[in-house]
Amino acid sequence: MMYGNDAVLAYWHCTSCDHTNSEIRVTCDLCGLARRHIEDPLIDIPHPPRFTHHPRFLLFCVWAGLGFVGLALLSKPAWRETLGIGAPFLILEMLAAYLSAADNVVAVIWDRWFNQIELEVPEKAATGKRFGAAIKLVPYRRIERIRISMCLIDRYFERPGSDQPSTRKVHRIACHELPVGRPLKGRREYVLRENFIAPFPITSHHDIGAEITASFLALFAWLIPSLGLMARNLREHGGYYLRVKIQVGLLSRTIERRVLVYHLGYDLFVG
């Protein structure tokens, strides 16, 4: 900034050695610390886990091995006749094994991309009131081609008739594309926020059949991670949820957190 013939010089302060440097310097004259490490500091987090050291790697090996066993039996008709196993069964077994192996690989990839992915929502919200939600991301490395959307959804059960089973419905109340704007730098914390209006809780969020199904799926969650997510969603018996979808290239991940919506008038309505 210029005032007549005088120039006001700007300086920056090095937090490592307490030296004051000229604005034009990109490193500290005394200790050599880069200015960008002060203005945009890195977060002290561990290195991303190795693929072979990840707990899901063992499950990947188990499912991939079962898939190869099915492929070997499928190529040997004599072995199938000896064991009494039909080709259709082996094809289904291979499909399930390879899908489970791929599911574990994708889980490892996400854990190697991000040190932390956390969705923060309030525990409850009153009908007609505005409430906020935030998604916090801490990537290990630079993440490009990332898209993030945040939606408020109503997961409820609908029964067509008294003698008919209930069906699970999903209604999207509001949805926003969060402005990422640029690639995420590694070892930094990013927080994206959005606001929503709490609806009136009028739909049914309870069903005994969903609880029974969730208990069955939970038995196999340790083998297939996606079954654990399905079991948790069913066990909640529906409700109002904040759903965040993170897409990096061709891979996507969905995170949901429930918000208890209530209305207190002549009666108490909770959803």
Image (cartoon, grey):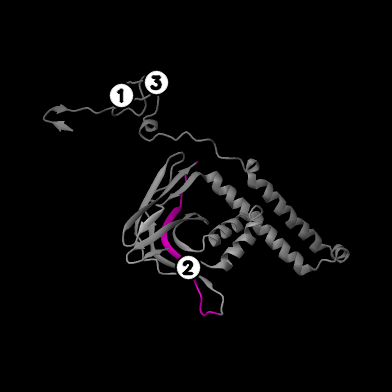
Does residue 181 appear in the picture of this structure?
A: no
Type of residue at label 1? Asn
Label placed on residue 156:
2
Pick the residue in front: 79 or 261: 261
Does residue 3 appear in the picture of this structure?
A: yes
Q: Picture coordinates of residue 165 (x, y %)?
A: 56, 75
Which residue is tagged 1? Answer: 21
Which of discs 1 and 2 lies nearer the camera? The answer is: 2
Start and end of the magenta stretch?
140-162
What's the residue at 32%, 65% (across, down)? 265
Q: Rate crowding at label 1 as few (under 14), some (14 to 19) or many (20 or more) other CA atoms within 10 Å.
A: some
What's the residue at 75%, 69% (across, down)? 88
Work out which quarter of the rendered image holds the C terminus and state it: bottom left
Marked residue nearer the N-terminal end (2 or 3): 3
Marked residue nearer the N-terminal end (3 or 1): 1
> In terms of secondary structure, where does tag 1 sit?
strand
What's the residue at 81%, 61% (across, down)? 73
Which residue is tagged 3? Answer: 31
Which of discs 2 and 3 lies nearer the camera? The answer is: 2
Q: Left or right: 204 with respect to 224? A: left
Q: Residue furthest left?
A: 4
Q: Picture coordinates of residue 15 (x, y %)?
A: 36, 25
> In terms of secondary structure, where does tag 3 sit?
loop
Relative height, residue 43 to residue 92 (above, below) = above
What's the residue at 55%, 39% (across, down)? 48
Type of residue at label 2? Tyr
Label placed on residue 231:
none
